[in-house]
Image (cartoon, rainbow, N blue to C red):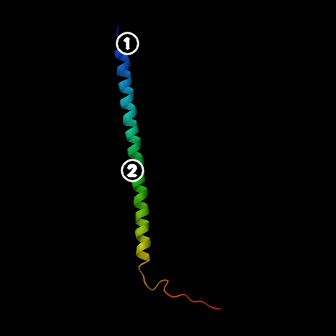
């Protein structure tokens, strides 16, 4: 009976399961990072759109 053949089959199955799990985890993390980046980008765009108004912040009233 050849035991090393069974060892190779078991190791290959373990490596492929670990690889697919690792890839799934990496894709999930990438998806979450893209969501966070999109949210930050929309906030940045909103802040830039609000800063275009030239009358806001151009005059400062100082009383002594």
Q: Position of residue 24 (x, y in %)?
A: 38, 41
Locate residue 25, reporting x and y percent: 41, 42
Q: Residues within 10 Å of mark 2 (few under 14, many from 20)?
A: few
Q: Quadrant of the C terminus?
A: bottom right
Please name which of the two marks, 1 or 2, marks the residue nearer to the observer: 1
The residue at which mark 2 appears reads as: 31
Residue at left 42%, top 61%?
39
In the image, is residue 50 above or below residue 58? Answer: above
**Number of marks:** 2
Label 1 with label 2: CB-CB less than 8 Å: no
Measured in 3D between alpha carbons, the distance from the residue under mark 1 to the one under mark 2, in whole angstroms, is 42 Å
Name the residue at the bottom extreme.
64
Residue 57 drawn at (x, y percent): 50, 83
Which residue is tagged 1? Answer: 3
Q: Residue 50 has which mark? A: none
Please report the residue visible at 60 percent of the width from the left and 89 percent of the height from the top. Answer: 62
Reply above or below: 55 against 12.
below
Label 2 residue SS: helix
- For this orientation, the residue located farthest to the right is 64
Q: Is residue 63 left or right of residue 51?
A: right
Q: Nearer the viewer, residue 46 or 12?
A: 12
Report the residue at 42% width, 53% height from top. Answer: 33
In terms of image quadrants, where is residue 8? top left
- Measuring 40% from the left and 36% from the top, which residue is drawn there? 21
User: Going by the picture, which residue comes out furthest to the top?
Assistant: 1
| Label located before the other in sequence (1 or 2) | 1
Secondary structure of the residue carrying tag 1 is: helix
Q: Quadrant of residue 10?
A: top left
Crowdedness near tag 1: few (<14), some (14–19) or many (≥20) residues, C-alpha within 10 Å: few
Position of the N terminus, as image quadrant, is top left
Image spot of residue 26 (x, y percent) = 40, 43
């Amino acid at each position: 009976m050849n035991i090393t053949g069974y060892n190779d089959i078991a190791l290959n199955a373990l490596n492929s399961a670990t690889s697919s799990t690792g890839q799934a985890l990496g894709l999930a993390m990438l998806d979450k990072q893209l969501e966070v980046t999109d949210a930050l980008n929309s906030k940045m765009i909103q802040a830039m759109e609000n800063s275009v108004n030239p009358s806001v912040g151009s005059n400062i009233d100082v009383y002594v």
